[in-house]
Image (cartoon, rainbow, N blue to C red):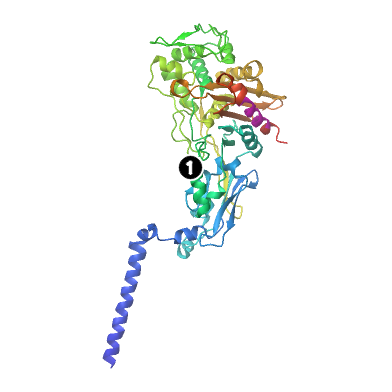
Amino acid sequence: MTRHIRHAALFCALLLVALLVNAARVQVLHAEDYEANPANRRAAIVRYQQPRGDIWVDGRPVTGSRDTGEHLRYERTYSEGPLYAPVTGFASQEYGTTLLEATEDAVLSGAAPVLQPLPLWNEFTRSRSAGGDVLTTIDPRAQRAAYEGLRGRKGAVAAVEPSTGRILALVSVPSYDPEPLSGNGRTAREAWARLNADPDKPMLNRAVQRTYPPGSTFKVVTAAAALDAGVLKGPDEPTRSPDPYLLPGTTTRLVNGTDKCRNATLRVAFVRSCNTVFAQLGVTTGVERLRRTAESFGFNDADLHVPFQVAPSTFDTTVDAAQLALSSIGQYNTRATPLQMAMVAAAVASGGQVREPYLVERTTRASGGTVSAAGSGAVRRAMLPATASRLRELMRGVVEDGTGGKAAIEGAVVGGKTGTAQHGLGNSGMPYAWFISWAQREDELEPKVAVAVVVEDGEGSRRQISGGGTAAPVARAVMEAVLRPE
C-alpha cells in the first residue's frame, strides 16, 4: 500500500513539475506570441480600464473620458472637438491614435515608465499608472480667431511666437469632431467611413500635413538670399529687371499682375509683388545660395516634429535657370506647409533667427507633478540681422502702402507679404491665397506673433482671389487675438 502511495505521490509531483515547466514556457518563451495574438484582448482591456489623461489648452482640458461600463470601459471625449482636432487628433479604440493623442500616448494612457513609481509591481499586477496630462502652447483666442476666420472655406492657419517657437494656433478647415471615433461600435465605424469618403478630407491637418506652392510669400526667402549674397546692396537699388522677363533658355515670357515693375527697386518690387524682379533675382543669386537660405529657414527638412511629424517643405535644387526663376517666386516645385511659412515670417520678426516650433509646453502626472518641460529649441541663423531689419521694413511697407492693408491693426506695428499661388495642370486650379505676417504692439520691443494663412477656395472669380483680400483679414484676427487678449 505504501508503495502505491509513493508512486502516486511521485506521479503527482511529476505532473506539478510539468505544469510549472509549461507555465514557464508559455510565460517566458511564448509571451510575445500570445501578447500579439489578435484574440488576446487583455492588453486592450487594461488600456481602457482607467480614464485617459487630458490635453490642456490655457489651463483648461479640451479632452475627457466617459465610463461606458463595458469591457473596454473608458472612451475619449472632446470639448469643442472640431476647433482643436488639428492639435489633439483622435484616440479611438478601433482606429488607434493620431497627432498629440499618438505622440503623447504613453503619458496619456499611463504606460510611460516615468509615470510608474513601482515598475516591477505594475509589471507583476499588469496594471498601469494613472494617465498623465499634456499641456499645450495653444492660445485659445488665437485658435478661435483662426477657426472662425476660415469658417466655410478650405484652408489652414499656423501662428507661432517668434522669440520662442511656441505654436499659438494650428487650424485646419474643414475640420471634424473626433469624439464619434472614440469607441469600437457602429457609431465609430460609420463616422470613420463618412470622414474617409468626404472629398474635402476633414481629417487632413492642412497646417502641417499638406504642402502648397507658396507663391509670392516665398519672395521673402528670395530677397533674404539676394541681400545676404550682396546681389543687391540695399532695398532702394534699381534691379535692372525687364518687364516682361524672358525665362532663360526659353521663349516663355513672365509677366506681372501690376505695373511699375520694370527696373524697380527691391522696395517697390516687394510692395507691388513684381514677379519679373524676383525671378531675375533668383537666377542672379544662383541655386546654391538660394538653397542654403531656403534650408536655413527650414525647407527640405524631413525631420521636423512638433512633436508629431510635419510634412517637409521643399525647394528643388535640380533645376535649370528657367525653373529656378519660377522657383524663386514660389512656383514650379517649391512647396511649403503653413507652419513653415509662419517660421519664415517669425525669422524676419526675430532678427533672422529661426527657432524650432513646438506644441507641448510640458507633461505632468495625474497628481500635477512635472514629467517633462519644453526647453529652448534649436536655433539657427536664416539671414544676417541687417537683412532681417531690411525685410521688416519691406514687410511693413506691404501693410502700410501695399496689398496687405487689410492686416493693419491700430496701435500695432504689422509686417506682411501677400501671395497668390497658381497650381493644377496649366494653372487650371483655383489659385491659393496666402498671407504671412508678424505683429507687435507699438509699446513693446519685439513682435509677439507670426502668422501664415492659406485659403484654398477663395470666394469670387480667379481674378478676385488675392492674399491681401482673402487671407490677410484672417491673419489680422489672429494677430489681434494675441496682442489684445482681453
Asked if residue 446 lies in the magenta stretch, the reply is: no
Which amino acid type corresponds to the residue marked 1 in the rendered image? Asn
**Toward which corner of the image does residue 401 lie, by quadrant?**
top right
In the picture, measured across the screen, residue 104 lies left or right of residue 8, that is right
Along the line of sight, which residue is nearer the eye, 324 or 346?
A: 324
Residue 371 in view, yes or no: no
Along the line of sight, which residue is nearer the eye, 438 or 348?
A: 438
Q: Residue at x 40, y 14 (%)?
A: 321
Residue identifier under label 1: 196
Q: Residue at x 55, y 13 (%)?
A: 257
Along the line of sight, which residue is nearer the eye, 36 or 199?
A: 199
Q: What predominant SS class does the magenta segment belong to? A: helix
The part of the chain drawn in magenta is 471-480
User: Quadrant of the image for the C terminus?
Assistant: top right
Q: Secondary structure at mark 1?
A: helix
Residue 63 in view, yes or no: yes
Q: Is residue 206 above or below residue 410?
A: below
Q: Is residue 267 above or below residue 61?
A: above
